[in-house]
Each structure stands twice: as structure tokens, then as C-alpha cells.
Image: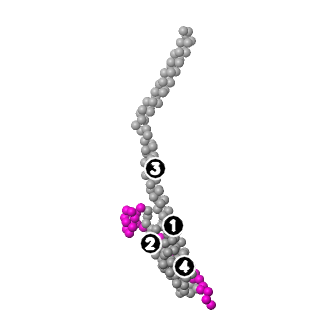
Amino acid sequence: MTERSEKAGRSEEGARSEVDASAAEPAAAAEEDAPDSGTAVIEFIFASIVLLIPVVYLMLAISQLQAASYATTSTAISASRIAARDADPSERRAHEVATMHFSDFGLKDVPISIAYSCAGPCERAGSLVTARVETKVSLPGFPLLFGANRSPHITLRASHSDVVATTGEG
């Protein structure tokens, strides 16, 4: 062999040994990090569950309260219109309409109270009749834990005024 080919052979061996040494360094580093491998996924799942469950519950609670708020307001508007257009407003009719509004918003068996007040005689055309609606809405899941009667609730109130319609008589 010539001198030149010997040098080329040695340089190839040196390059191989450098490559082998550099390949061995990451493998050694990976062996040191091996006890921690795979825990990022577990930590991410744990953190997601810990944060996700309260956020989902909060969204459910707020959406139920918003639906109850809409139903209470709709009931107050309907109840005042019933009282303003009928000479003898029926409590039963107002409660039927209230039950319909609450069921439209997905709320069943919610206690509803409707109270009327008038500015002047209620039967006189042009007087103002006001309907006040109050309801108590339980937070999701609490009736299962505490029972329907003792569960924490939020009281919602709405009122609406309407003018009593003319009767059409002379």
C-alpha cells in the first residue's frame, strides 16, 4: 500500500470512530433521561382533567342560570299582558304560560310565583298593571347531593308593566 492510501484508511477509521463516539453521546444522554420519558403526556392529561372539569361545570351552571333568567323575563312579560288584556286574569292561565316558558328553556319542576300589582283600579282602561315573577333555580348536580328541597339555589326575579287595554264599551 502506498503512503497515501494508508493515510486515507486511517482518516476513514478516525472519522468512523468520531461518528461512533458522537452517536454514543446522545444514547448515553437518553439513558440518563429515561426515567422521565413519557411523563409529559400524563402530566398534560392530569392538568387537562383538573382544569377542564371545573370549566365545564361552570359553563353548565351559567347556561342553566341564563336559561332561567330568560324564562323568568318571558313569564313576567306574558303574565302582565294576560292581566292587561283580560278583565279577570286567571292565575291558572298565567301559571300555565309560565310552565310553558320554563319548559321551552329546558327547566322542569321549577317553583314559580307570580304576583300582580296595579297603579289605580286594575279594571280601568289605561291603568298600569305590573307582574312580578320569582323563581328559585338549583345549580346543576346539587339536588342529587342535597335533595330537591335543601339544595343550594339562586333566586331570580323579573317584573314587567303593561297598560290595561280598553274594553271597547262606550
Alpha carbons under labels 2 and 1: distance apart:
15 Å
Magenta run includes residue 69: no
Q: Quick check: 17 above or below 83?
A: above
Q: Amino acid at mark 2?
A: Pro
Residue 168 painted magenta: yes
* Residue underneath mark 3: 48
Q: Kindly tell me whether residue 41 is visible in this rendering.
A: yes
- Magenta residues span 141-170
Mark 2 or mark 4: which comes first in sequence? 4
* Whether residue 69 is visible: no
Q: Residue at x 49, y 75 (%)?
A: 96
Q: Earlier in the sequence, mark 2 or mark 3?
A: 3
Query: Rounded to the nearest whole Å, what is the CA distance between mark 2 and mark 4?
Result: 20 Å
Mark sitting earlier along the chain (3/1)? 3
Q: Which residue is mark 2?
A: 111
How would you rate the neighbour count of disc 1 (Cα within 10 Å): few for under 14, some for 14-19, many for 20 or more?
some
Compute the Cα span from label 4 to label 1: 21 Å
> Against 116, is 154 above or below?
above
Which residue is tagged 1? 105
Q: Are marks 3 and 4 in contact (CB under 8 Å)?
A: no
Instruction: Give the numbered dot on residue 82.
Output: 4
